C-alpha cells in the first residue's frame, strides 16, 4: 500500500495536469526510498522501477504499458490497471509472501551508481532529437 504522502503528491500532479508518467514517478521514488531504508530489496534497478509503476497503476494512475514492452509485461500492466479500478486489496498471504521474497534481495539496486547507470542506459535508447526535446521542455516548464 502506498504511503499517504505519495498518493497526495500523485493527486497534486494530476490536478496540475501533469502526465501519468510524472504521477507514477512519485511511486517509483517511494519504492527507491523503501529499498534505501531497508524495508525490502530488489534484484535490479529495473525491478524497483517496475514495482513502483505497478503500485501507481493499482493506485489509479492511468499509465499505459510502453510500446517496447513484451506481451507478458503489457498484460500485467493491463491487469494492474484493472485492479486499480476495482479497488480490491491484495490478500494478506500474497502480500506477505512477496514482501518476504523481496526482503532477501540486495539493496544495491537503489544506489546512486545503479540509478545513474539505469538512466544512462534508458537515455541511450532514445534519439538525440528526443533527448533534446525533453530537455528543452524541462527547462521551459521548470518552476522559477
Image (cartoon, rainbow, N blue to C red):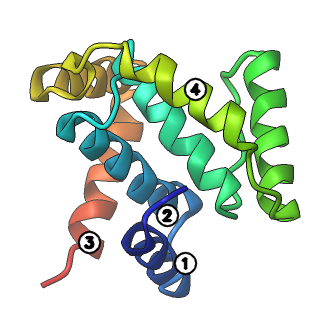
Q: In which quarter of the image is the C terminus?
A: bottom left
Marks 4/3 in contact by CB < 8 Å: the verdict is: no
Up the image or down, 137 lies above or below 30; here it is: below
Q: Residue 23 carries which label?
A: 2
Q: Tell me the distance, in whole angstroms, between the alpha carbons under discs 4 and 3.
A: 41 Å
Q: How crowded is mark 1: few (under 14 residues within 10 Å), some or many (20 or more)?
A: some
Q: Residues within 10 Å of mark 4 (few under 14, many from 20)?
A: few
Callout 2: SS: helix
Marks 1/2 in contact by CB < 8 Å: the verdict is: yes
Residue marked by disc 1: 14
Q: Nearer the viewer, mark 4 or mark 3?
A: 4
Q: How crowded is mark 2: few (under 14 residues within 10 Å), some or many (20 or more)?
A: many
Q: Is residue 37 visible?
A: yes
Q: Tell me the distance, in whole angstroms, between the alpha carbons under discs 3 and 1.
A: 19 Å
Q: Residue 98 carries which label?
A: 4
Q: At 84% across and 40% down in the image, what residue appears?
A: 79
Q: Tell me the distance, in whole angstroms, between the alpha carbons under discs 2 and 4.
A: 24 Å
Q: Position of residue 17 (x, y in %)?
A: 54, 81
Q: Position of residue 102 (x, y in %)?
A: 44, 22
In this view of the protein, which residue sits in the foreground, 134 or 54?
Answer: 54
Q: Quadrant of the N terminus?
A: bottom right
Q: Where is residue 24 in the image (x, y as percent from the top left)?
A: 50, 55
Looking at marks 3 and 2 on the same chain, the residue that comes earlier in the sequence is marked by 2
Looking at marks 3 and 1 on the same chain, the residue that comes earlier in the sequence is marked by 1
In this view of the protein, which residue sits in the foreground, 81 or 43?
Answer: 43
Residue marked by disc 3: 140
Callout 1: SS: helix
Amino acid at each position: 500500500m502506498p504511503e499517504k504522502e505519495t498518493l497526495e503528491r500523485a493527486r497534486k500532479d494530476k490536478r496540475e495536469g501533469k502526465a501519468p508518467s510524472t504521477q507514477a514517478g512519485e511511486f517509483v521514488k517511494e519504492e527507491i526510498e523503501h529499498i534505501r531504508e531497508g524495508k525490502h530489496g530488489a534484484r535490479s534497478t529495473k525491478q524497483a522501477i517496475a514495482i513502483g509503476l505497478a503500485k501507481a497503476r493499482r493506485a489509479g494512475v492511468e499509465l499505459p504499458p510502453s510500446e517496447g514492452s513484451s506481451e507478458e509485461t503489457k498484460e500485467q500492466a493491463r491487469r494492474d490497471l484493472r485492479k486499480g479500478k476495482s479497488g480490491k486489496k491484495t490478500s494478506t498471504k500474497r502480500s506477505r509472501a512477496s514482501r518476504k521474497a523481496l526482503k532477501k534481495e540486495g539493496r544495491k539496486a537503489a544506489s546512486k551508481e545503479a540509478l545513474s547507470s539505469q538512466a544512462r542506459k534508458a537515455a541511450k535508447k532514445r534519439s538525440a532529437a528526443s533527448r533534446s526535446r525533453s530537455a528543452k521542455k524541462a527547462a521551459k516548464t521548470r518552476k522559477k
